[in-house]
């Protein structure tokens, strides 16, 4: 299948995933993340505010705040096809500009450079055990990750993992996949 067909198929599969299983599996994924040294050692975490059918990130964000970690979220710039990360706190003013994502308003928060981010939670629809992914189609993360040198990880249900993903020269793999069955070291 082509990337576009895979995106469509997996968006549908994830949208139809029963909420009880989704919640149960998400809890397991999050617990694997919280118990891992990657989480324990991180001070600043790059992550999106999830939207359906992505794995819910609200609990991760709130736990980070509780543990006095910094959360940064992306702001996409469609006209230049790039993104930047900004500090995110409970009172941060958000807007929805690109593809329905909740994003920070750059005039109301502080930009954080990539070298200040310890781990990046990279969204996606499909993943290989070698860390390659098919995202949502904008290419924003591959462009950003080309100059990001922290730890890259993704959260995924096992149903999202398959090893026949076609990769391009500009695709950037993640280092770890956190699933309901455990952690896959992709390196």
Image (cartoon, helix red, strand yellow):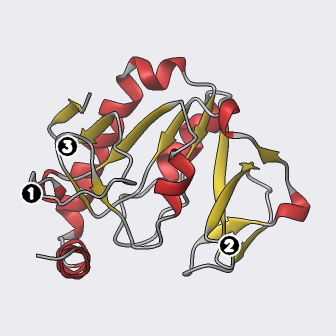
Observer-side mark, 3 or 2, equals 2
Vertical placement of residue 51 versus 43, above or below: below
Query: Quick one: label 3, few (<14), some, or many (20+) residues within 10 Å?
Result: some
Q: Which residue is mark 1?
A: 164
Observer-side mark, 3 or 1, equals 1
Query: Quick one: label 2, few (<14), some, or many (20+) residues within 10 Å?
Result: few
The reply to whether the C-beta atoms of the residues labelled 3 and 1 are less than 8 Å apart is no
Query: Quick one: label 1, few (<14), some, or many (20+) residues within 10 Å?
Result: few
Q: Secondary structure under badge 3?
A: loop
- The answer to which image quadrant residue 38 occupies is top left
C-alpha separation, residue under disc 1 versus residue under disc 2 = 31 Å
N-term mark: 3 or 1: 1
Vertical placement of residue 38 versus 74, above or below: above
Badge number at residue 180: 3
Q: Nearer the viewer, residue 77 or 108?
A: 77
Q: Secondary structure under badge 1?
A: loop
């Amino acid at each position: 299948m082509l990337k576009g067909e895979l995106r469509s198929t997996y968006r549908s599969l994830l949208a139809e995933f029963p909420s009880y299983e989704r919640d149960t599996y998400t809890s397991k994924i999050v617990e694997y993340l919280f118990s891992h040294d990657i989480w324990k050692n991180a001070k600043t975490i790059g992550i999106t505010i999830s939207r359906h059918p992505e794995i819910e990130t609200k609990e991760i964000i709130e736990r980070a705040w509780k543990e006095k970690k910094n959360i940064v979220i992306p702001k996409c710039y469609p006209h230049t096809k790039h993104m930047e990360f900004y500090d995110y706190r409970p009172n941060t003013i958000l807007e929805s500009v690109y593809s329905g994502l909740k994003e920070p308003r750059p005039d109301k928060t502080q930009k954080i450079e990539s070298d200040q981010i310890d781990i990046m939670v990279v969204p996606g629809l499909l993943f290989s055990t070698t860390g390659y992914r098919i995202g949502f189609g904008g290419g924003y993360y591959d462009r950003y990750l080309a100059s990001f040198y922290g730890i890259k990880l993704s959260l995924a249900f096992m149903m999202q993992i398959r090893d026949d993903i076609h990769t391009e020269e500009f695709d950037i793999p993640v280092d770890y996949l956190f699933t309901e069955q455990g952690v896959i070291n992709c390196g």
